[in-house]
């Protein structure tokens, strides 16, 4: 067996003293193959591209439905409207995001601090589309 060589070190006061280097290496198991390549998020979210648009939510009126300030909403203008759908409603002042209820026809907020809007009494509201998905960023870029 070969003799060990001294590691040159300026700070060593005695021959044979040197620097000790330690390293920790973690080995991770490879994850199993996920199978066939999934469709894109675009294909999964958007079924009718010419009738779909994205809008960013503002405010806190729909937090009980999981829609938060800054959430990105995917809106389909060609969807059939059902009781309980989250909708975009337009008026002269702008747009609202609310839950549509049928009996009586009204727009309901997802926050008790906001009143219901009875559509019979508020004909200025026009239902523009149904929110089919929402995306909320959980971590900054």
Image (tube, grey):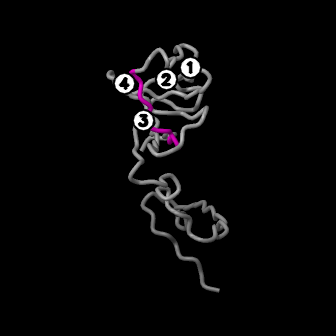
Question: Which label was assigned to residue 111?
Answer: 1
Q: Is residue 109 visible?
A: no
Vertical relation: 97 (above or below) 29: above
> Which badge, 4 or 2, comes first in the chain's sequence?
2
Residue behind mark 3 = 128
- Tell me the SS state at disc 3: strand
* Cα separation between marks 3 and 1: 21 Å
Marks 3 and 1 close (CB-CB < 8 Å): no
Residue shown at the point (55%, 29%) measured from the top left: 100
Residue behind mark 2 = 60
Residue behind mark 4 = 91
> Which badge, 1 or 4, comes first in the chain's sequence?
4
> Which badge, 2 or 3, comes first in the chain's sequence?
2
* Cα separation between marks 1 and 4: 20 Å
Vertical relation: 3 (above or below) 109: below
From the image, state whether disc 1 or disc 4 is nearer to you. 4
* Cα separation between marks 4 and 3: 10 Å
Q: Is residue 29 magenta?
A: no
Q: Give the overall secondary structure of the magenta segment.
A: strand
């Amino acid at each position: 067996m070969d003799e060990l060589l001294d590691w040159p070190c300026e700070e060593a006061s005695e021959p044979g003293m040197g620097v000790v280097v330690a390293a920790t290496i973690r080995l991770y198991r490879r994850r199993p193959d996920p199978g066939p390549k999934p469709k894109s998020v675009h294909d999964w979210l958007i079924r009718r591209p010419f009738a779909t648009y994205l809008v960013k939510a503002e405010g806190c009126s729909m937090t009980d439905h999981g829609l938060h300030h800054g959430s990105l909403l995917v809106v389909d203008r060609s969807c059939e409207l059902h009781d309980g759908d989250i909708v975009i409603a337009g008026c002269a002042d702008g747009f609202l995001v609310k839950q549509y209820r049928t009996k009586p026809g009204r727009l309901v907020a997802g926050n008790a601090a906001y009143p219901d809007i009875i559509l019979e009494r508020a004909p200025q509201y026009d239902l523009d589309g149904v929110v089919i998905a929402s995306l909320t960023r959980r971590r900054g870029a």
